[in-house]
Image (cartoon, rainbow, N blue to C red):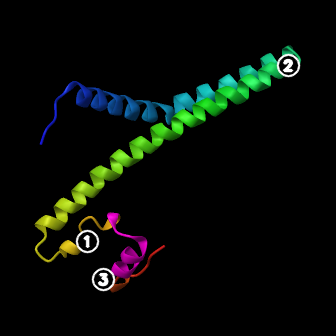
Amino acid sequence: MKRHGPLDRFRSAMSTATIGLVKAAGSPGVALLSVLLVVAWLVAAVALGFAEHWVELLFGVSAAATFVMSFLILHTSRRNERAVMMKLDELIHVTKAADDEYLQVENRPLDEQEDMERERPGGGSGD
């Protein structure tokens, strides 16, 4: 069932933007820019005598960036995980010898997952 309402388009656009932002944040250019900003910050702090408000501002900006990026990364990871699960479920559906009991196994309690892993042929390397 496809949804095409304004909320769905907004969610899709935000998800696409989030993925783009996470990819950009992990690029070498952004890493270099981050290092340059920290160096510039240190130079400015030394020139101005390490005023307390500089340190507080650095901590505040760092905390805010870390907080936001953790949610962006989590969203991207969950989206990728969902896609992989859908692909694996489809492969189980089309494989005649597959056991349907493994569909949606990620939603089962951990002890059931461990039991299933031990019981499957050749299985049991678990975490």
For image coordinates 84% across by 22% down, the residue present is: 52
Q: The disc labelled 1 sits on which kind of residue? A: Tyr
Q: Is residue 109 magenta?
A: yes
The answer for how far apart the CA atoms under marks 2 and 1 are is 59 Å
Q: Are marks 2 and 1 in contact (CB under 8 Å)?
A: no
Residue 90: where, in percent of width, then height?
Answer: 17, 60
Residue 120 — which label?
3
Query: Which mark identifies residue 102?
Result: 1
Indicate which disc, 2 or 3, sits on the residue closer to the N terminus.
Answer: 2
- Majority secondary structure in the magenta region: helix
The image shows residue 66, relative to residue 103, as above or below, that is above
- Residue 106 position in % (x across, y down): 34, 64
Q: Where are the magenta residues, as a range?
A: 107-117
Residue 22 place in picture, x, y as percent: 45, 35
Mark 3 or mark 1, earlier in chain: 1
Residue bearing mark 2: 51
- Residue drawn where x is 17% and y is 74% of the image: 98
Front tag of 3 and 1? 1
**28 and 119: which is toward the camera:** 119
User: Please, what is the three-letter code of the amino acid marked with disc 3?
Assistant: Arg
Residue 10 vs 85, above or below: the answer is above
Q: Secondary structure at mark 3?
A: loop
Per the rendering, the mark at residue 10 is none
Name the quarter where the N terminus is drawn: top left
Question: Position of 35 compared to 117: left or right?
Answer: right
Q: In the rendering, at what x and y percent does residue 71 appear? A: 48, 39
